[in-house]
Amino acid sequence: MSEKFSRRDFLKLAGVGAATSAILTGCGPASRYVKREPYMQMPEYNYNGQSTYYATTCRECAAGCGLIVRTVQGRAIKTEGNAGNPLNLGKTCARGQATLHGLYNPDRVQEPLKRSARGGDSTQAMDWDAAIQVVADALKNNKPEEIAFLMGMAPDHLFDLVSDLAKATGMNAPLRFGALGMFEARATLSKAAENLFGEASLPFFDVGGAQVVFSFGANFLETWLSPVSYTRGFAGLREAKTKMRGKFVQFESRMSQTGGKADEWIPLRPGTEALVALAIGKLASEIRGGAMPRAFENVDPIDAASKSGIKLETLEHLAGMFAGSNGALAIPGGPALGQSNGLAVAEAVLALNAISDNFGKPGGVYLSALAPNQSEYQRPASAQEMQEFVQKMADGKIKVLFVHGVNPLFELPTALGFGGASKSVSQIISFATFPDETAREADYVFPDHHGLESWGYQRVATGSAQPVLSGAQPVVSPYYNTRATADVLIAAAQLAGGSFASALPFKDEVEFLHGKVSALMGEVDGSISAPDLPTFMAYFQQHGGYWRNSDERVAPKAGDALNREISAEVAEFAGEGEFFFVPFVSPTLAEAGANKPWLQELPDPTTTVMWNTWVEMNPETAHELGIENDDVVRIVSEAGELEVPVYLYPAIRPDTIAIPFGQGHTAYGRYAENRGVNPADLLGQHFNEAGDLAFAGMKVKVEKTGAKKPLSRLESMMGVYGIGLGEEH
Amino acid sequence: MATLSDLKISEVKLGEEHTGKWGMVIDQDICTGCQACVAACAMENNLSFVGEEDSGYGRSMHWIRIERFWEGEYPEVKMTPNQPMMCQQCGSATCEPVCPAFATVHSQAEQLNLQVYNRCVGTRYCANNCPYQVRSFNWRDYERPEPLPNQLNPDVTVRRRGVMEKCTFCIQRIHKAQDKAKSEGREVVDGEFTTACAQACPANAITFGRVDDPESMVSQLAKRSHGVKHLEELGTLPNVTYFKGG
Amino acid sequence: MAYDKKHSEHAPSGQHGGHSEEYLREKHLMLDPLPRGQMNDMVMESMLAKPTWKFWVVASLLAAIVAYGLFYSWGRMIAEGLGIAGVNRPSYWGIFLVNTVFWIGISHAGTFISAILRVFRAEFRRPFTRAAELMTTFGLVQAGFSIFMHMGRVWLAYWLMPYPNQRMIWPNLHSPLTWDLLAITTYLLSSTMYLFLPLIPDVAMARDRSTGWRKTFYKTLALGFRGTEGEWTHLRNAMNIFAFAIIPVMFSVHTIVSWDFAAATRPGWSSTIFGPYFIVGALHSGMGAAIAVLAVIRATMKHMDYFIRGEHFDAIGKLMLIISMAWAYFFFNDYMVQWYGGDVWTKQLLHFHEAGPMGWMWFAMLICNIVIPWAILWNPKWRATPWLVATVGIIINVGMWFERYIIVPISLSINRMPFTWRLYQPGVEIPLGIGTLAFFILLYMIASKIIPLIPVWEVQEGQMAHELKKFGRETVVSVSELE
């Protein structure tokens, strides 16, 4: 008994009364036959004034950083980075810090709910037995191919579990999707890697080892792939310990937080990134001498200069910089890839690295190390794949939709029609922790635990030289009557019987985890080793996961990266309007941070705006249009329109406007609801060749509304911009 | 007869004589402005969030803020290096003498500026007089709905309305580390603990430690020639050194 | 006019016209004596006059404003925090401190008129020393309200008082705010004493002429004063001592208030000239307020046109003009000292004063404080016109309020950290400020019904000392040494 019950559960039971069977069955994972393992050698029990630290994994984005959570008397107090985890080496981003505001969010889904009508607020509470029966019935009473799972981007244990289930039963393979992946254009990156290197893997850019970094739109200090790891890389680039201070050049039409750190910020005309990269390649090859590679042959730098709006001298200077350095690195990413020619951009920029021949070398391009229990890179779904899926839903081919870890109604552009298509799905079951938009449209909400209350593991897709499997364990017992989705599925599969039962022959989630992780026990090069599974699992939890000690990044086979034709065509833009439209992910809120009050109150790194959405506009342009700060304007695209206050942003092209993604929720709790707008509403259904959404390929109109909405800024408009000082120019 | 040495006058050492105890070095060249320190500080120190209206009216409770300005005009526009600004823990702090209630006092043991919340009556003179403008005032009892209070750090007082607050250099962590070292019969080792902001910083732009120990990381860094201290000309003897970048 | 008949009966007749005895008597209260008994009756009558319906309307309106503006709003602020006011970072002090300085300034005129003019034997002061002293006390009450309102945790305000306590700490004597509190408290106590002493003979007079609760009330206040020679000697000694002693208190209190600003490490505040500048500013607004109060008393109360005449407005008008010039000089001085200092932040602030979003206030201040007084008060005829001088007095007060507004919230908007610059928009300060003004007026209205507003003994004393003598055809005023 003492093995199975932690002291906290005992207290809980004692407090509520042992006769309450709901509590017994509702006992969270913390009360299982395995114990949570504290970080370092510490007693699990809590003493007054003593903290207990647990290692787990951050679930705020899909990067998979390791966390150490400080708990005091059963409460999670503070998250720190896990210094042992090779991915983040003890560091976290702001979202990782604020994860506790998710755990203790006042608006969590507190128990299984049955919704009276989709989209309505009226719900009935259920007990978990009934909930499991609902899931079991859904599995049993539908054809496997009519059942689909939509999941978050993180390649975690639940994804493995659902994949196994799908494989065994013929269900649709689970789709992983996230707005971050969409705005990163992950599919484009891996497609370009496939085209150039023959392997559809996620490239890894060793920023820290480089001398000169040319980033074409990659916002690697914000939300891109693995921001904590890339920020560390950036610090390495800048630190002059063993080498010269590295230079950093950013090419983009709107200065991102990343661009703000650049030594040279090159505002190019959107859509000309490939052309510019190839022109720089050509000029650099000329400087380096030798035969002109095929990729650059047909590019005219003068043409590139005129089309991109960059002066020819600047291009020459940049080419000189790139060619003159032994450690030049070019990174494609962000809005540069989210255009009709995104794949060409990715290829052109990746190919640029061939000039400095940095493939597989420090300061160069690698392919990311696969996680320890992974055989190939598992790419999240691209927007086009999502569109195909939505089409399937609309066609009535999906009868049951399970949603976990993703909020498609918010994250997918409205134009993709998820909302409409969901009406053709007879049953939607959400496992959302928070009452998000999709949960509101679901027939049932069977809330999963918060990440900090959960077991699991997560494969680190990129960012670490070593293969990392971040481990997760509950740091506190579940606060509400929630249940691990893996447990719900396992129980439901047993109830459903047949191939479902045989696909998931586990007692519970933990047994499933054991099975998955046990394969690592025999490895020799691991961070932990143990002779038996319980000890191994204890170490796994205690240290926050498992990683190999060796650098397993793959050197890309790039023999003929430059020996191929790369299109220098300028991107096409959809819609009519005088402005290029750049949506970008808010670095502090990202796709799911809006319900955390302290994330709302973090000033945006570039504009210092808090609690709202703004549109960035060049002050000169605004002046011509008679628009001032805080004026609410209507942005009209072919797909939709929205009204948003203006921020006169000095570092954006006069022909471009930009809106952060992260706000504009219509559900998702008191801090997120009805705040700001969602730029995804403006995006049309246009994809690049790799299937990523051409989110930066829109043109929009701007109309004045006459209304004003003062934005909350941390900065002083007087002190920073001289507005209101009596010195207006 | 009382001699001069009998008089317990707290001497303020000026100029080269002054050495603080705890200090920070901030490398603005690698600070990316990501706000991780701000969030970490808020979580560690039980900062209230104030909502859209108040935060836009200069009432946010950030103990650390990241300043950035602009240089030049488009297209040659540049963001100035991000400048994290928090209490500089001045050796001769202008906030201290003006408080009528002794609520903001100098710790002789830690050489920090302490803010004694339960002694503060809210005249806000200290905040007026802080040249760095890093003090936050509790203009209201800011709401923290259940169950958010579960997250509160028990080592840090929760402040009510009418009370001034500011960065403490995570003094609760200093004390914890010192207690631990004492119980183990040793001195606190450099790098054994750090402040919440420095701990979170993904770029490692913030270094915290003993400035009176020439061997510590922070002292070594501070010796670099291009470090500056803000508004040093006022004689405040700040303990935070900035590397401007480049 | 009520007193006219008796007056003419009493007046010697048949003299030359022009600057004749007749003219001088009409002009000067001191040369126009009435019997003590008659003056007593006049003062009692004006005090006991049954309040008109207008009085009640005004008083209840003011009471309502006080109840809402002062007590309800303050209560709300105590309950909810200073968030409902407009203070923010960097303007941590707002209208609260503006009003504090403003009311302390108002209170200065009382002491100035009563003590300094008494010490220097300015004879015109006699009828209105009481009115001025009341202003001091009532103004300080408002200043106290304003400063306490501004505190974040006013329920702990007593911590600022030096008394032995379980916390084992004294207030911080380094802090200008501590000195401030001590100075204001001292000033309030001494000015109340100084109001009380000259009041004794008058309440004794009132005691002898009233019945009911008033009799008890005045009896208590009069401390058994009978007007014996010995009592008068003691009283005169006490008043003399207080008159001399309160002058340095008055000077110290406003210089100490100025230290709140001058001792701070802030551009625009750290100015060495602030002490005298604040004193002159205080006198400027105080004289303006005093003359406005006199005009109202004269216009609304019975028999007051006998006691308060054009000569008084003329004399105070002259003082106002001189003080306005002194203020202009100190303002210029302060500006120059700061500008020549060359500090970039200070220069930025000075520029912000004139050209910032509140630049209009800077110019309005100069117009109210310099241009209008100089333009009007030069003219002796205008100077003797009560409503006009009173209007100028009110305008000066508006100007001086602006001056304090520029010093406090506007100067606070700009500092050495441009990232934090922000303007200040008052919130609940407005009802609170109006509440203090209403309370001041209300206190005055109540006082006018229970306290003899004219120090009859002082007027009589002066009238006895003044004499018109004839040297040939010339009528000459002679003043004998008192006592």
Image: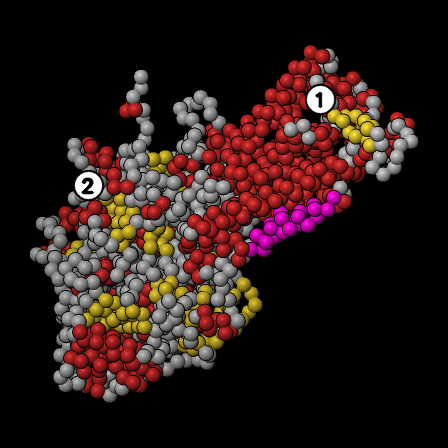
Q: Chain of mark 1?
A: C
User: Who's the residue at 62% across and 41% down the image?
Assistant: C323
The residue under the point 47% across, 48% down is: C338
Q: Quadrant of residue A177?
A: bottom left
Residue A292's place in the image compared with A552, above or below, is below
Relative placement, left or right, of B234 versus C366 is left
Q: Secondary structure at mark 1?
A: loop
| Image quadrant in which the N terminus of chain A is located | top left
Give percent across and percent down for residue C119.
Answer: 64, 27
Q: How is the image coloured?
A: secondary structure
Question: Could one spot residue B207 in this view of the protein?
Answer: yes
On the same chain, marks 1 and 2? The answer is no
Tell me the subunit letter for badge 2.
B
**Foreground residue among C124 and A315:** C124
Residue A346 part of the magenta-drawn span = no
Q: Which portion, as a residue range, is magenta? A: C359-380
The quadrant holding residue A232 is: bottom left
Q: Nearer the viewer, residue C427 or A579?
A: C427
Please tell me in which quadrant of the rendered image residue A191 appears.
bottom left
* Label 1 environment density (alpha carbons within 10 Å; few <14, some 14–19, many ≥20): few
Q: Is residue A315 above or below residue A161?
A: below
* Mark whose residue sits in front, 1 or 2: 1
Q: Residue furthest left?
A: A524
Q: Residue drawn 29% across and 39% down?
A: B14
Q: Is residue C137 above or below residue A442?
A: above
Query: What amino acid type should be assigned to the residue bearing mark 2?
Result: Asp
| Tag shown at residue B213 | 2
The amino acid beneath tag 1 is Glu
